[in-house]
Amino acid sequence: MKRVYNFSAGPSMLPEQVLRRAADEMLDYQGSGQSVMEMSHRSKVYQGIIDSAESLLREVMNIPDTYKVLFLQGGASSQFAMVPMNLMTKSGKADFVLTGQWATKAYKEAARYGDAHVVASSKDKTFSYIPKLDPSTFTPDADYFHICLNNTIYGTKFHTLPDTGNVPLVADISSCIVSEPIDVSKFALLYAGAQKNLAPAGLTVVIIREDLIGHAMDITPTMFNYQTHSDNGSMFNTPPCYSIYMAMLVLDWLKNTIGGLEEMKKINEKKANMLYSFLDQSSLFHGTVVPEDRSLMNIPFVTGNDEMDVKFVKAATEAGFVNLKGHRTVGGMRASIYNAMPVEGVEKLVDFMAKFEKENK
Ligand SMILES: *Cc1c(COP(=O)(O)O)cnc(C)c1O
């Protein structure tokens, strides 16, 4: 068996230890005589899995008791509609910072349901930085203020949060969930598609302050109302059973093998620093993001020559470093180095890049 180093932005690598455990438990989950894929979501044994996934997430992320954890479907993209339908119901206004394609999609979707206001944008420079924010430009009576905390495509991250006062801060954390500690109490609502850093595709995690539940617009479909899922322990209908189980295994790995998010952060910083340091001294490759806004998870880089980029991606693929092609709007390359990417994978990539650089001067 040969496994590649997979730098995909999502779906992406899962920890090998987790995949092995899932394989071991595939035919007979803990003496139940069934796979988790086959069992009733109403069974006692499955209830144990979803409860344990939630309690591990609460423990690993240090989520206060005043927040609900919901396991939903529909991807982060459904949250672009679900958030306004549930929250944009008092003044009907919300503020947005446009730091990339996902943030822009969240804004455009919200604009269908209310008065969506763009506070700032970094589109002028292909979203290669996080705009400086001036709180005097924020809408004082907004129902919420939306940011995309880590911008998967462009490789930027908010290293300081906007000061929104009493306005609830909502963040898309799809590509940085459980990559480092985050103070949940600073946010009113956090959401993430699981397929970047938590589980296979199919699961969307929502962490919402309890007082924000129960105010949805009348037009809100039952399935899009947070209340529906909150009242039913994320079991109003069949949940994404297997993805929740995989999230449980990943969280167990984070807690017991890695030792929690402080430790995970150190490892992620080590990996990112290795790649950024190489890019900063390279005569062939360079990063596309301003240093102060760099992401720990997604690192775009280019040679400045499209043909050379293509040549590099092809050579890297042949050497077992896959999915390094950059997003079409940035070009070049992007290395997504989520939790499951081992340190060794980045070390070897950097060695390979150095060798490629020498051979292509
Ligand atoms: C991948 C991604 C999305 C889209 O997620 P889906 O689950 O495919 O809808 C949204 N926001 C961010 C930041 C992402 O990285």
Image (cartoon, rainbow, N blue to C red):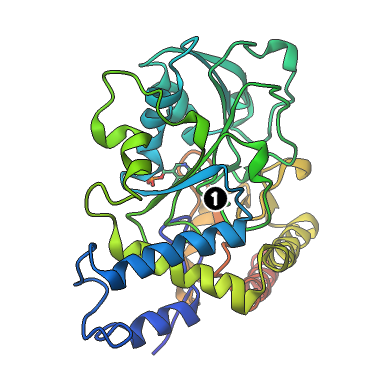
SS at badge 1 = loop
Residue closer to the observer: 261 or 196: 261
User: Which quadrant contains ligand 1?
Assistant: top left
Q: How many marks?
A: 1
Give how far across and how far down residue 202 sits, in percent: 32, 55
Left or right: residue 84 versus residue 122 is left
- Is the shortest distance between ligand 1 and the CB of mark 1 under 8 Å? no
Q: Is residue 211 visible?
A: yes
Looking at the picture, tell me which residue is in the foreground, 66 or 265. 66
In the picture, measured across the screen, residue 90 lies left or right of residue 263, that is left
> What residue type is disc 1 on?
Gly
**Of residues 114 and 107, which is closer to you in this image?**
114
Please give left or right for residue 273 compared with residue 251 in the image.
right
Which residue is under mark 1? 332
Q: Is residue 4 above or below residue 120?
A: below
Residue 226 drawn at (x, y percent): 37, 36
Establish if 91 lies above or below 274.
above
Answer few, some or many: residues within 10 Å of disc 1's Cα (few below 14, many 20 plus, some between 14 and 19): many
Residue visible at 25% across and 83% down? 32
Q: Relative to 78, say whether 263 is above or below.
A: below
